[in-house]
Image: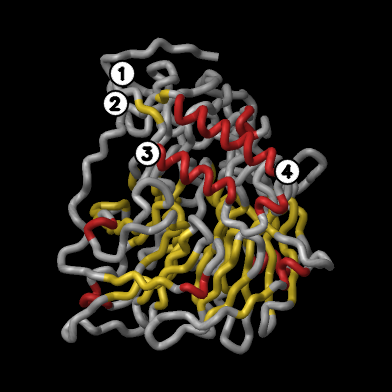
């Protein structure tokens, strides 16, 4: 373990957790389910509340590059939306998506799927509740459900959807508990588990959202098991696994060649699955992605992944010579020291994820030991971790980040706006909902040679894009340019975000 003295010449700011972080954390414990207090012991909840209160009273060290210089505005002309409350949408919805039948589908955190008819004004009819995922064990059982998307082959007359889910618990969750499941039929009544025994943290780092890539493969984000790459008490002393903290890719053509489903992808502790094997259907597309709720394949061909950084208190691993890395090489240095109880808050990032890239969350099973940008010089370095000795280089495969969020933003749901509202002012822009602090829709514009983020507009700059009650996901109806936002706090609800266009601007047509 390396212990370093605080250097005031580099950083002097000491800050406590914002009260809003506490509130959002409490909401995350409740994590959106009407059943949580019935299904979880109230004593567990009380313990977690006490721990969070202690967090508020503990000072923490912000990163040295906390001050963020805003980019140029991503919005050039006036853009206005109105927020319309939808009282018939009460519940905590983890994912929202438009179906091929023109209806809005919403998964709830306990495993129900709601299907809403969309009225001409964008409001929603009363939902049909689909219980097939809950009923698949033989009796109605809540499932902690995050990802929901439709297969590109799905049509209004032939629905096919994919969901990710785990055991319905938020503390002491069983390991190897994640599943990817295919639903089909007019009411998504046919349930087929496709992948089983994906990693699972003890809390709410789970098998998360799903997106189909331009290559026809299915991609999803897999949360980490730890805060900073090595087992720690706050996360149940669970070590990382080969598939945790990553973007995973499922090749459906290779999957179709299998004789039977589900495919068991447990990689250790009795499991034998090898994602590096030549014909493996499930592989690691990119690694070191700590806890990404959502992901976006943009029309520019890039994959963008907003990822939540860690609070203080985590540990990072020491390097282990001889470990196999993702590219097949064997790690032989440099030596990286273990760090414990790191006091530095970590930023949330938007990554432009490339195949085979590493994005900063260590994992000893993949031969990745340096957190974020390491600490290469005695000056301020990108995404540096000051606890490392000066001279600690980032991993040779570290790809950096496309955009840095303020501390504790918790960026989650992400989409590319495709409608032509406001003469196409938002078309091609990236929209991200920020769950904590800002509680808004942030507008980002990719560009340049690398397609990183070159412009941004805060949600407060756009009427209708701020003042949400803990937003976690969003989707667009590209026929109209309307959007729907899942607000998580309280009883939860879906809010309609409707563009306000004048006669000249009313070019809201179905995108190509």
Indicate whether 491 appears above or below 266.
Answer: below
In this rendered view, identify the residue nearer to me: 96 or 319.
96
Q: Marks 4 and 3: which is nearer the front? A: 3
Res. 446 in view: no
Q: Residues within 10 Å of mark 1 (few under 14, many from 20)?
A: few
Marks 4 and 3: CB-CB under 8 Å? no
Image position of 128 with respect to 413: above or below: below
The residue sitting at 51% across, 27% down in the picture is: 54
Can residue 63 be seen? Answer: yes
The residue that disc 2 covers is: 380
Which residue matches tag 4?
175
Q: Nearer the viewer, mark 4 or mark 1?
A: 4
The answer to whether the residues at label 1 and label 2 have Cβ atoms under 8 Å apart is no
Q: Pick whichever of labels 4 and 2 is earlier in the sequence.
A: 4
First in sequence, mark 1 or 3: give its number.
1
> Residue 266: x, y in percent?
75, 47
Q: What residue sits right under mark 3 in the picture?
A: 407
- The residue sitting at 22% across, 45% down in the picture is 70
Identify whether 368 is placed above or below 152: above
Asked if disc 3 and disc 2 are in contact, CB closer than 8 Å, the reply is no
Answer with the quarter of the image where residue 385 lies.
top left
Residue depth check, mark 4 versus mark 2: number of the one nearer the observer? 4
Q: Is residue 142 left or right of residue 100?
A: right
| Quadrant of the image occupied by residue 331 | top right
Q: Which residue is mark 1?
A: 378
Earlier in the chain: of badge 4 and badge 1, it is 4
């Amino acid at each position: 373990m390396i212990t370093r003295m605080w250097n005031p010449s580099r950083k002097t700011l000491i800050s406590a957790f914002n009260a809003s972080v506490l509130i959002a954390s409490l909401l995350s414990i409740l994590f959106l389910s009407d059943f949580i207090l019935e299904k979880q012991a109230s004593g567990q909840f009380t313990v977690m509340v006490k721990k969070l209160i202690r967090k508020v009273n503990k000072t923490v060290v912000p990163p040295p590059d906390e001050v963020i210089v805003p980019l140029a505005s991503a919005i050039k002309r006036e853009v206005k939306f109105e927020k319309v409350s939808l009282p018939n949408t009460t519940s905590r919805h983890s994912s929202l998506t438009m179906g091929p039948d023109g209806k809005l589908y919403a998964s709830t955190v306990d495993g129900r799927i709601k299907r809403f008819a969309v009225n001409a004004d964008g409001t929603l009819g009363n939902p049909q509740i689909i219980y097939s995922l809950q009923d698949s064990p033989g009796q109605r059982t809540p499932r902690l459900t995050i990802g929901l998307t439709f297969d590109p082959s799905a049509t209004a007359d032939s629905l096919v959807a994919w969901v990710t889910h785990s055991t319905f618990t938020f503390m002491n969750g069983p390991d190897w508990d994640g599943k990817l499941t295919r639903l089909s039929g007019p009411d998504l009544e046919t349930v087929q588990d496709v992948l089983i025994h994906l990693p699972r943290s003890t809390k709410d780092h789970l098998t998360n959202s799903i997106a189909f890539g331009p290559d026809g493969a299915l991609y999803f984000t897999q949360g980490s098991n730890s805060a900073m790459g090595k087992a720690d008490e706050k996360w149940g002393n669970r070590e990382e696994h080969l598939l945790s903290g990553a973007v995973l890719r499922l090749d459906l053509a290779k999957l179709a060649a299998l004789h039977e489903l589900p495919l068991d992808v447990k990689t250790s502790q009795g499991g034998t699955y090898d994602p590096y094997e030549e014909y493996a259907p499930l592989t690691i597309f990119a690694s070191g992605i700590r806890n990404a709720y959502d992901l976006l394949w943009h029309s520019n061909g890039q994959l963008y992944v907003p990822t939540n950084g860690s609070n203080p208190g985590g540990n990072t691993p020491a390097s282990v010579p001889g470990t196999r890395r993702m590219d097949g090489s064997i790690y032989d240095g440099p030596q990286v020291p273990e760090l414990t109880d790191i006091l530095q808050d970590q930023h949330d990032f938007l990554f432009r994820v490339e195949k085979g890239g590493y994005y900063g969350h260590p994992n000893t099973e993949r031969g990745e030991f340096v957190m974020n940008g390491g600490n290469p010089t005695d000056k301020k370095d990108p995404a540096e971790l000051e606890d490392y000795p000066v001279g600690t280089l980032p991993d040779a495969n570290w790809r950096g980040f496309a955009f840095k969020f303020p501390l504790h933003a918790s960026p989650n749901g992400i989409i590319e706006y495709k409608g032509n509202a406001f003469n196409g002012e938002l078309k091609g822009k990236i929209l991200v909902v920020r769950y904590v602090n800002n509680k808004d829709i942030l507008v980002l514009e990719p560009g340049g040679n690398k397609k990183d983020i070159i412009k941004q507009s805060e949600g407060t700059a756009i009427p209708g894009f701020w003042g949400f009650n803990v937003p976690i996901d969003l989707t667009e109806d590209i026929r109209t340019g309307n959007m729907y936002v899942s607000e998580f706090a309280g009883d939860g609800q879906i809010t309609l975000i409707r563009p306000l266009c004048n006669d000249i601007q009313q070019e809201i047509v179905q995108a190509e």
